[in-house]
Image (cartoon, rainbow, N blue to C red):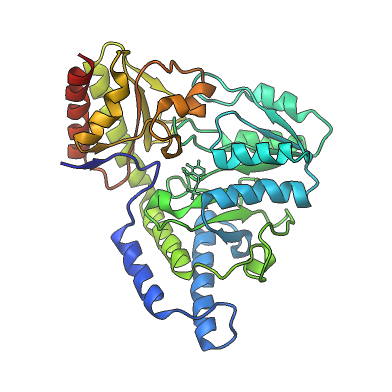
Amino acid sequence: MKVYLDNAATTPVAPEVAEAMIPILKDVFGNPSSSHAYGRAAKAEIEKSRRSIAAYLKCQPSEIIFTSGGTEADNMALRVAVNDLNVTHIITSPIEHHAVGLTAKAITDEGQIRLSLVKIDEKGHVDLNDLEKLLQSNEKTLVSLMHANNEIGTLLPLEEVSELCRRYNAYFHSDTVQTMGHYTFDLSELDIDFITCAAHKFHGPKGIGFLYVNKNTKVNSIIHGGSQERGHRGGTENIYGIVGLAKAMDLAYEDVHAHQKYVQELKTHMINELKAYFNDLDFHGEIDPERSLYTVLNVCFPKNEKSSMFLFTLDLKGVAVSGGSACSSGANSGSHVLTGIGADMSRPNARFSFSRYTTKEEVDYAIEQVKSVYEKTLA
Ligand SMILES: Cc1ncc(COP(=O)(O)O)c(C=O)c1O
């Protein structure tokens, strides 16, 4: 049996998404910037997708800027804040995805801003009192805090942070790459300047996503070229990607509460089974369903000398999981998130991440393999 439990790294493309993309890939080849019928047909597909995505998020279509994915959208949010909004101070956390953390560091190294890192607790929750203290500087500030951590699943209370940012006149960006398509967003209510999306995290294609920019936040572009995306992002559009993204949104949101309930049950089942088997078991990050991303479970297993073989052996058994984020090469020693929350790095850890296509049988198989692999590897 092969079991894929690395859905926080990426998800398989839904068959309906592939079906929606194929005719576009085959037949709609016009350049959307061309004024003839071929171009207009391509442009129409893009604008239809944009309207559909905006309707789910309760925002205006013009607030959606298509990008090559989450990394570009995060880079763009931070860069335009500095370039166009006179931001001289960025507040972020030590456990952001590198798309934010390393961009903030690069802008700091370029001498453009002052960088502050907000305190977080051992579960990855942001210390809101510390955030408020940091906001009391007189500089124009951007707060960039992720909605859900991709390695440990801890959720940020978006509304509370938004209120704090508004109170201190700061801009607010949230990396919502792990939550878009998994939770509903009402941008007519939530006061936020930027959020980001990557289609491949919810059964859409790779290489496509978007940056939401609040209509009251006036920014230019960081990718110069043609006047695509109303001048916000040069480059001929990824039409079939955009259509695939919109279709993935349809599928994600047509039954989002049922998906949430179903996947949370799988996660709770795994928590209970593992707790019943291991005496000395811990979880990295938050596991309270109200404050934790329901697709992610980061388990900290008991200590043993041979633990470095743990993920490798699971892989041989057909169970694909990750030791942190995909970008940290499966080794928890590389995880800035686990280091950031002060985790015990000598203990083996695994991030199990689920999707609405994951079955209970697959989870049970993974649990059995964990048990047996653990016995064999660590005995
Ligand atoms: C929280 C978070 N932000 C950003 C990204 C980057 O997105 P993409 O892979 O589309 O560039 C990821 C994906 O790994 C992520 O999990």
User: Above or below — where is 351 with respect to 122?
Assistant: below
Instruction: Residue at 38% x, 34% y: name it.
Output: 296
Q: Is residue 24 left or right of residue 275?
A: right
Instruction: Residue at 43% x, 18% y: name it.
Output: 345
User: Could you say which is closer to the camera, residue 221 or residue 60?
Assistant: 221
Residue 291 is situated, as x and y percent measured from the top left of the image, at 47, 30
Instruction: Residue at 73% x, 56% y: name it.
Output: 219
Image quadrant where one finds the N terminus? top left
Residue 26 is situated, as x and y percent measured from the top left of the image, at 37, 77
User: Could you say which is closer to the camera, residue 64 or residue 338?
Assistant: 338
Quarter location, residue 175: top right
Residue extending furthest toward the top: 279
Residue extending furthest toward the right: 138
Image quadrant where one finds the C terminus? top left
User: Above or below — where is 184 with respect to 43?
Assistant: above
Quarter location, residue 259: top left
Q: Is residue 371 left or right of residue 105?
A: left
Q: Is residue 186 visible?
A: no
